[in-house]
Image: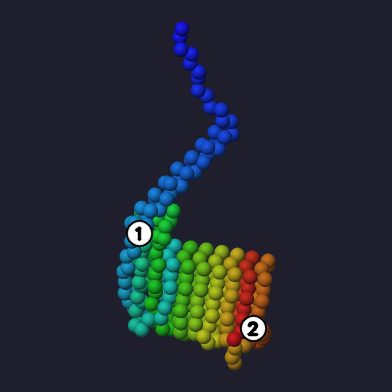
Amino acid sequence: MPEEVIADYDVRSPASRTLLTVIGTILAVALFAAAVLGVSILMKDTKTSTSIIELGDSAQIVVNATTADIRVVEGADDVVKVTSKVTSGLRKTDFLIGRKGDEIKVISGCTSWLSPGCGVSLTLSVPKGIPVVINTTSGDVTADALEQGVLTVATTSGDISVGDLTVDEFSAESSSGDVKASFATQPFAFKALTKSGDISASVPAGDRTYAVTAESKSGDVSSTIDSDENGQGFVRATSVDGDIDLRSG
């Protein structure tokens, strides 16, 4: 008599089989991502270089950058010194810097999901009093203890943060980033414009008075700076969705 064969069959429901398949896929992706992250961390490398740029007859410094973070400090020489830190991982970070006339152009980019922590940061050391213009797409911009002159910063999605300034005028514009500013002495003018970013600033009290404009369509607005329509200077902070906080003292 032939041996009876009982066929194997899966008693699990279709929903259970689908759930197990999804979980298995998620685990496989997570393991792959962890492996990529581990390799990228092991391959992480930061290279630093310094460039010296002679000013010549240039009346100002203009930096046009893509994703690089930029810090502006005051230098002791009559030249511009650019210190670049380029961090790569599993893939090399792209970085190019060049000059044409008054313009310093910086092109950078990296694949952050393949190389966590990758990117470019620049420290720009500038002569005292020279006007500085910084434009970036998504890089953050900071500045510390700049004296005299005019500082103008514009970024699409980066944050702008400056402190201890004694410049004559500071102007900042960002679409989705925040603007933070503090002054060591009274400037002639402070202007800030954002779409969805917050604006906060601290301006010392003193002999100079200001015509103050602080407006946001949907954000909260607070100001302790007394407004004088006939003031010797002006403070303008406007935003679409961001909050505005202006302080005196």
Q: Tell me if 157 is positioned left or right of 127 in this view.
A: right
Identity of the residue furthest to the top in this view? 1
Residue positioned 59% across, 34% down in the render:
15
Res. 120 visible in picture: yes
Q: Which mark is residue 44?
A: 1
Residue positioned 47% across, 44% down in the render:
27
Front position in the image: 6 or 225? 6
Query: What secondary structure is marked by label 1?
Result: loop
Classify the position of the C terminus by image quarter.
Answer: bottom right
Q: CA distance from mark 1 to mark 2?
A: 47 Å
User: How many other residues sit within 10 Å of disc 1, few (<14), some (14-19) or many (≥20)?
Assistant: some
Q: Position of residue 139 (x, y in %)?
A: 46, 65
Q: Which mark is residue 198?
A: none
Q: Position of residue 10 (x, y in %)?
A: 53, 27
User: For the residue marked with disc 1, what is the amino acid?
Assistant: Lys
Sequence order check, earlier mark of 1 and 2: 1
User: How many other residues sit within 10 Å of disc 2, few (<14), some (14-19) or many (≥20)?
Assistant: some
Res. 211 visible in picture: no
Identity of the residue furthest to the front in this view? 1
Query: What secondary structure is marked by label 2?
Result: loop
Residue 194 in the image: above or below residue 246? above
User: For the residue marked with disc 2, what is the amino acid?
Assistant: Ile
- The residue pinned by badge 2 equals 225
How many numbered marks are there?
2
Residue positioned 32% across, 68% down in the render:
48
Q: Position of residue 122 (x, y in %)?
A: 39, 69
Residue positioned 53% across, 37% down in the render:
20
Q: Position of residue 16 (x, y in %)?
A: 57, 35
Residue 4 in the image: above or below residue 26? above
Residue 240 in the image: above or below residue 112? below
- Check whether the beta carbons of the residues at disc 1 and disc 2 lie within 8 A of each other: no
